[in-house]
Image (spheres, rainbow, N blue to C red):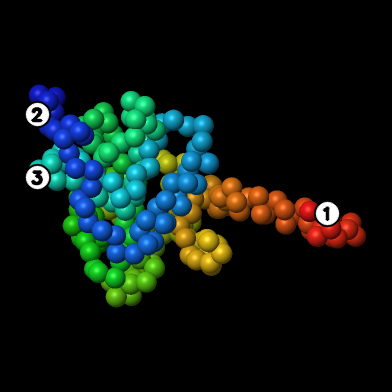
Amino acid sequence: MLPSELKHLPSSEELPCSDDTPVDNEDQNLLPNVLLFLLNTIWAERMDWYFGVDMAVYHPTGENPRIPVVPDAFLSIGVERKKGGKSRRSYVVWEEKGVVPILTLEIVSHQPGSEYGEKMGIYQKLGVLYYLVYNPEFWQRDRHRPFEVYKLVNGQYQLESGEPYWMPEVGLGIGRCQTVFGNLPQEQLAWFDQNGNRYLSEAEAERQQKERLAARLRALGEDPDQLL
């Protein structure tokens, strides 16, 4: 799109912040937010990224720039954490110096959506490098895997293999894990390092440290319950 055409596009203040479509299940809010909270720890010192959850992404590659695509989550690198020091209402590509998300995530619900069709086509045309589809319950219905990573290769999405899947352009891996959230066991999505080690939440890291200390005390013949 030419600079002269960009001048006539609406600003973020003029555009709705979402498509007002309610989520189908709690995981569509919970799992992306878990990824966001982890990133806030992993990349605490970095100010050049933004992770949006259920937020409208406006882009000039569709038929109408006023019609957004709304991923369950997306990650952009090379943008401000707070745009102009303020929270974003939506992500408007032409106000982000043309930076499109490097990663988008869709979580499939009980109602078949467009995760494997229309949305994939939108992200492909937009130039999103990694497209993730998490489908833990209905993958057999949809004839897909429970967790899929697609990478844009020569303008087309290519299904990748391996989990956790390492994304060198992002500097993170992503995959599934079994963990406990709110005292309930649950499968979640998580970030991993290049060696396949999962990044722990602050609560998990603290609990793991206490368990290691308790094990050392027992090895020395001490009762950790009397000391911790």
Q: Residue at x 18, y 31 (%)?
A: 11
Specify few, some or many for label 1: CA neighbours under 10 Å numbering under 14, 14-19, or 20 or more: few
Q: Which residue is mark 1?
A: 227
Q: Which residue is mark 3?
A: 63
What amino acid type is highlighted by mark number 2? His
- Of the image marks 3 and 2, the number of the one nearer the N terminus: 2
Residue 66 shows in the view: yes
Task: State whether residue 68 is above or below residue 11.
Answer: below
Residue 89, image x and y in percent?
27, 38
- Of the image marks 2 and 1, the number of the one nearer the N terminus: 2
Q: Residue at x 10, y 24 (%)?
A: 4
State the SS at label 3.
Answer: loop
Q: CA distance from mark 1 to mark 3?
A: 66 Å
Q: Which residue is mark 2?
A: 8
Quarter of the picture holding the N terminus: top left
139 relative position to 173: left or right: left
Q: Residue at x 47, y 46 (%)?
A: 37
User: Mark 1 or mark 3: which is in front?
Assistant: 1
Q: CA distance from mark 2 to mark 1?
A: 67 Å
